[in-house]
Image (cartoon, grey):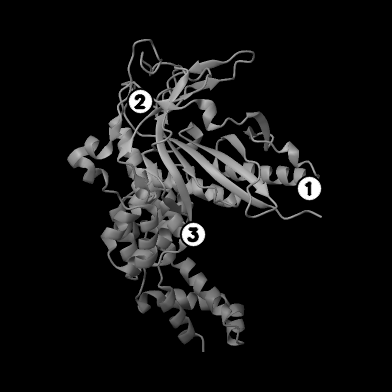
Amino acid sequence: MTKQYYTTIGLEIHAELNTKTKMFCNSKNDPDETRPNVNICPVCMAHPGTLPVINKQAVEHVVRVGLALGGNIADFTEFDRKNYFYPDIPKGYQISQYKYPIVSGGELALPAQAGAVKITRVHLEEDTANSKHDRGDYSLVDFNRAGVPLMELVTEPVIHTAKEAGAFGRELQLLLRYLGVSEANMEKGEMRVELNISISPDEKVFGTKVEVKNINSFKAVERAAEYEIKRMSELLDAGRGSEIVQETRGWDETKQSTFSQRTKENSEDYRYFPDPDLPKLKLKEVFGENFEKVKALPELPSAKRARYKNDFGIKDEDIESYMTDMELSNFFESVISDLGSREAIILASNFITSDLLGILKINSTAKIPDYQSFSKLIKMFAGNELSSRATKDILLMLATEGGDPMQIATEKDLLQKNDEGALKAIVEKIIAENAEVVAIYKAGKENALMSLVGRVMKESNGSANPQLVQKMLKEQIR
């Protein structure tokens, strides 16, 4: 019988920061550069006699992340040398932070889940170069990435499910984008997640920790965690717990499995010591009077969710559509300011999340329309100038061709007909042509009336007021 095991997960997440230059030199920080070894200089290539200079903007970015997480911002911080030898480290050591990180503590609340994930630390370091293993029997190294400012965030070991690990990664990515400190695009390697995972039959005792690297998506984070939980559970069930060793494992996306890479190093193996070429930092002195500006944060994802829900009553799943798409979110914010009323904003949101997103998904030429034209369309619908069908048809035209909704409605004869005299002929025609449906309705089948309403709407090209049509049909059918 399979025993119950308790899972403990901690995350180490690296994110490349948005800066013009690298962490310790003036070489360009350009994640979109495709030519190898063009954004390099003697400093990031570790030529003899060169000295690093700290990128102030990168320090500011990490401070802002720490403030958003509610962490403690260190007044004193310093950089250390993390010593290890690998082809992607030109100096033979990486400049990182060990004893005095910029941020300690804090937490990140996850949407639709109770509680928050506690943070151990957030520190700043330089990225490594990029090894290319696609040449068969030899590898090459691209040093464009070497020295790029890299934020590392370490969580407390308080995550207990694979889903929660994936949710944390997604929420952190969102926060970094809202702060403007990183695009955190996993496909480009701008954000990298490492899992530290263990299982134990005793909830109060940690099992042997395994680290999983090479994870390139949040879904892969969840699958890697699930795989490791299953692998270690099966070993413990079979009495082979000694085969679970502290090691670094890689994730094979093709095989959907992890594989052993090397025995996990401890911090003492890296022989950390303060970098003698870099000054100690007292952050309040570094930023001086500008420190208050550094502390001024934009509206964070958690606050925006609460505003959309409390002020407008937007559904949770619709809120997430805005949270994860900044262009759509900015569009909706403009619509909010243009419409004003809660009722109109809810109407607008329904059309955006159900109709506009559907149009954008299936039509490659469609784009988000001008917010003023869209707001005008919503006002026309709310004012009974347009039916729901006509509103959707005009929205499609706005997204694919642009234009003015009133002009489109007039030219296409889509303005809703509220004149009984104008609709009388159509209603009489539909009643005459559908004697069987009329008989069913007279026999007590109320749904038959809606069938007749639909036929009147079709006959009027969607321009008839459906409530008025329903009233006229009831009056005509005695």
| 52 to the left or right of 167 | left
Circle on res. 115 = 3
- Give SS at disc 3: loop
Figure quadrant of the N terminus: bottom right
Residue type (three-letter) at the residue carrying disc 2: Lys
Residue lying at 45% horizontally and 24% vertically, measured from the top left:
94
Residue lying at 37% horizontally and 67% vertically, measured from the top left:
310
Q: Residue furthest bottom?
A: 478
Q: Where is mark 1, residue-wise? A: 237
- Give SS at disc 2: loop
Which of label 1 and label 2 is nearer to you?
A: 1
Residue type (three-letter) at the residue carrying disc 1: Asp
Residue lying at 56% horizontally and 32% vertically, measured from the top left:
266
Is residue 32 visible to the viewer in this orientation of the structure? no
Residues at marks 1 and 2, CA–CA distance in whole angstroms: 49 Å
326 versus 311 height, above or below: above
Residue type (three-letter) at the residue carrying disc 3: Gly
Circles 1, 2 touching at the beta carbon (< 8 Å): no
| 412 to the left or right of 474 | left
308 versus 186 height, above or below: below
Residues at marks 2 and 3, CA–CA distance in whole angstroms: 36 Å
Q: Position of residue 52 (x, y in %)?
A: 33, 21
Callout 2: 10 Å neighbours few (<14), some, many (20+)?
many
- Give SS at disc 1: helix
Task: Choose between 203 and 449: the one closer to the eye.
Answer: 203
Circle on res. 22 = 2
